[in-house]
Image (cartoon, rainbow, N blue to C red):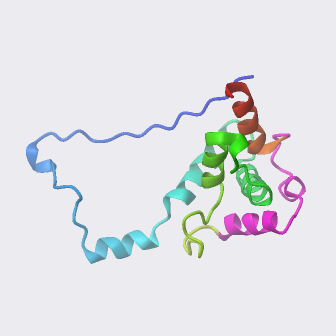
Amino acid sequence: MSIGWNFQMQYDVPTNITMLQQYPPFYDRKFREKRTTEETDRSLFYKAFEDVLNGAGIDGRDCILRSICENAAESLHHEANGLYGLIFHIVFTPNYGNEAGDSNMDPSYMEAQRAGEYGVECHTLYSKCTLDDGLIGLFSILDYELG
C-alpha cells in the first residue's frame, strides 16, 4: 500500500522592479490587527488536511481530532521516532509554541488535545475515523519503513 500527499505553494513572479519590496516588508498597525483576527496557519492546515482526507473517502475531521487526541495521550516526540515523530508532535499539538492557545482556532481542536491529556479513549471518541491505527499508525509505519 502506498500513500502520498503533495502540498504545493505558488508565488507570483514579479513582472517589473516596482513589484519588489525591501525585506522584511513594513506592515502598518491595521494590517497587524487584521492578521490577528484571521485564522492561524495551523487551523488552515487542519482544514486543508481534512479536505484531503475527505477526498480520499475518510472522515477528515474525526481523523484530525483523533490524531490530536492520540498525540496528547502519548506523544511521538521521543528519540525512537526521530524526525517524523517530532514533526507529527508539532503539527498535531494545537497550542504548540503558544501555551495559551489561539482564540481564533476552532475550540474542538483544543478539546481533542485535552481529551487525550485526560486519558480518554481517542479511537472511541472519534470513531468516524476509519483508519484502523489513525494517522499516527501511518507515521509509525513510515518511520519503520524508512528507518
Q: Is residue 72 above or below residue 60?
A: below
Q: For the image shown, how many numbered marks are present on the structure? A: 0
Asked if residue 51 lies in the magenta stretch, the reply is no
Q: In which quarter of the image is residue 38?
A: bottom left
Point out the image quarter for the N terminus.
Answer: top right
Q: In this view, does 10 lie to the left or right of 87?
A: left
Q: In this view, does 8 lie to the left or right of 27?
A: right
Q: In this view, does 42 lie above or below 80?
A: below
Whether residue 54 is visible here, answered yes or no, is: no
| Residue 14 locus on image (x, y percent) | 18, 41
Asked whether 110 or 13 is in front, the reply is 110
| Residue 26 locus on image (x, y percent) | 22, 65
Give the residue displayed 65% in from the left and 54% down from the top: 92
Q: Give the range drawn in magenta.
A: 107-132
Q: Is residue 79 above or below residue 1?
A: below
| Residue 58 locus on image (x, y percent) | 75, 41
| Residue 18 locus on image (x, y percent) | 9, 49
Whether residue 13 is visible here, answered yes or no, is: yes
Point out the image quarter for the C terminus.
Answer: top right
